Structures are given as C-alpha cells and as structure tokens.
Amino acid sequence: MQGKDLYRILGVDQSAGADAIKKAYRKLAKEYHPDKHPGDKGAEQRFKEISQAYSVLGDPKKRQQYDQIRKFGFPPRHAGGGFQAPGADFDFSEIFGNAARTGGRRRGRMAGGDFNLDDFFGFDGLGNMFSQIFETQQARSRGHSSNGARTNPNDIQATLEVPFKTAALGGKMMFKIPNQNGKQVSLNIPAGTQSGKKLRLSGQGKVGANGHRGDLLVTLKVPKHRFFEMRGFDVHCEIPLEKSKAKKGTKLRVKTIHSKTVELKIPMGTKDGQLFRLAGMGILHGKQQGDQYVKIKVK
C-alpha cells in the first residue's frame, strides 16, 4: 500500500502556512461534504481523506513529524544519512524497512539505529496510523485483511465505552485491566476520538514465559449522541425549522459541544438542508479549532 501525500490531498505546497492549509481544508471539506453528496461513496471517502490529511497538517507538531518522515524516511532523533523518501506518493514500508514487517512493538532498524514508532509519534498519534498501514500491507501479502492490531499471546485485548463528550473534547478515564487482580490504569482519550480507535499501553499485558509483559490493547467505543455528530474535527447537528420561519428568517439558539449556547441568524428564504457554520465551535486539535455545522431541516 502506498502512503498518500497529505499535501497533495489538500492541494497545497509543503511550504504553505497554517492559514493556507486551513483555507484549503475548508474549501475541500465543503466541496466533498457528505450532505452534498448523499449516497456517494467516492465523495465520502474523499471527505475522510481530506479530514485525515488536515488532522496531521493542521497540527504543528504532527506536521513537523510527518515532514521529517516524508523528507528523510526516519525520525529526526536518528537522522544521519540513509533512506531518502520521494516528495510525492511513497511506500512507508520501504522507508521504515523492518518496522513495516515486525510484530510486537513497532520497532525497526534504520541507518541511524533502532527506533520505535510508539516512542516517536505517541501511540495515539501518527505511529498508530502508520503502523496500521504497515500491517494492512503485510496482511494483504498473506491473503487476508488486518484490523491494525498485532497478535501477541501475552497481549490483553479489551474494549472501553467512552462518553461522547469525552471522546469529542478529550480527557482521562480510569480502566480496570481484565484478569489483572483489579489493577487500574489511566487512559488518555485524545480529542476527536471515534469508535474503533485503539490505544496500546506497553508492558501492561500478561507476563510471558521469558518474563516480559505483553501490551494492553484497548478498543474504544463511542456511542452516538442524540444531537451532535463528529466528522473529523468538525461537529455537526440538525435543527428543525418551521417553513414560515425559514421563509421570513429568524434567530435560533444553538447548543455547542462546549456546553455553550450561541445565537445563529437564519436569513430569509433558507432552504431545507442548508448548512450554517459556527466558526471555532468544533474540536480543538493542536492549535487549530474545528467548526460546528448546523443543518436546517425545514418542516
């Protein structure tokens, strides 16, 4: 599988500033928004790619990490010659070598020595995203699919339901490890967490025959909210409106994910399905803030 160039997805140059990247993201997100293309799987996939690209390039720290990978093919702490990745689409397995093929922790050897994707990217971040690319490629070569989780007999796999607002805004949750005498660990839930996200805690699994512990892998489940829906780092909601008010125009009080209420002006002649943006009322990621979109349902 080839790693898609995130700058190309957003249609910006690598030298583009944060404002230019944000502007490009908003333009593309609006163009390929699922509400504008109901039932169009292609547009839906494009929207997901755009959101994923912005989740990296819109975060200064993740963008810096991605640029290092894109340019050198290895983390900056181990720089010093070696692989050179092309500037366009590239194959992460060729860049990371053994990291794309080894089990257990995401470790590999490069020109600069051993490195660990979890240590470099953080398990909640790009390390998990890239490792899933690696493992999917490995699984396909064996003729079956992969869900991104590596198999280790000493790993403990479990699930945890995360309240919607905690998943959206981020926070910490205590988790009791199964079959570990009541041992609890604190989990850091990243803002914008979606159902199916996996967290890995190194060394929190079962003790193996060699005395080494496996890892704890927790799959997060996020229940649907009756009003809000997360799409990338944006929040969406739908509000019913009487035809007469849509025709004449009105003002609405709209709840936000941040437990605030803001006023939204509905202009004359508003149509069914029309979207309104509440800037900066979405999910915080890095120094960037997503938006909230309000869809009007004329009844």
Image (cartoon, rainbow, N blue to C red):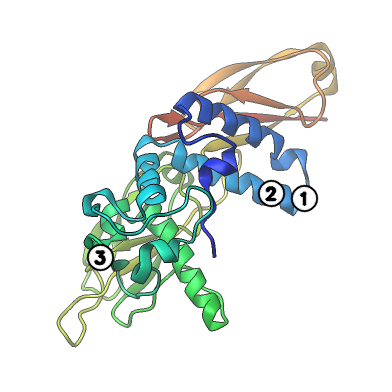
Q: Residue at x 23, y 73 (%)?
A: 180
Q: Which residue is mark 3?
A: 202
- Three-letter amino acid code at the position of disc 3: Ser
> What is the x, y in percent for residue 215?
28, 70
- Local crowd size for mark 1, using a 10 Å CA cut-off: few (<14), some (14–19), many (≥20): few
Q: CA distance from mark 1 to mark 2?
A: 6 Å
- Local crowd size for mark 3, using a 10 Å CA cut-off: few (<14), some (14–19), many (≥20): some
**Helix or strand or loop: what does disc 2 sit on?**
helix
Image quadrant holding the C terminus, namely top right
Name above or below for residue 153 compared with residue 75: below
Which of the pair 185/99 is nearer the observer?
A: 99
- Three-letter amino acid code at the position of disc 2: Glu
User: Residue 69, labelled with which disc?
Assistant: none
Which of the pair 63/37 is nearer the observer?
A: 63
Q: Is residue 73 left or right of residue 242?
A: left
**Mark nearer the N terminus (3 vs 1):** 1
**Helix or strand or loop: what does disc 3 sit on?**
loop
Q: Which residue is mark 2?
A: 44
Q: Is residue 42 left or right of residue 287?
A: right
- Three-letter amino acid code at the position of disc 1: Asp
Name above or below for residue 17 compared with residue 136: above
Contact flag, marks 1 and 2 (Cβ < 8 Å): yes
Q: CA distance from mark 3 to mark 2?
A: 34 Å
Q: Residue at x 32, y 66 (%)?
A: 106
The answer to whether residue 247 of the structure is visible from this angle is: yes
The answer to whether residue 230 of the structure is visible from this angle is: no
> What is the x, y in percent for residue 113?
21, 63
Name above or below for residue 218 compared with residue 36: below
User: Residue 40, labelled with which disc?
Assistant: 1
- Local crowd size for mark 2, using a 10 Å CA cut-off: few (<14), some (14–19), many (≥20): some
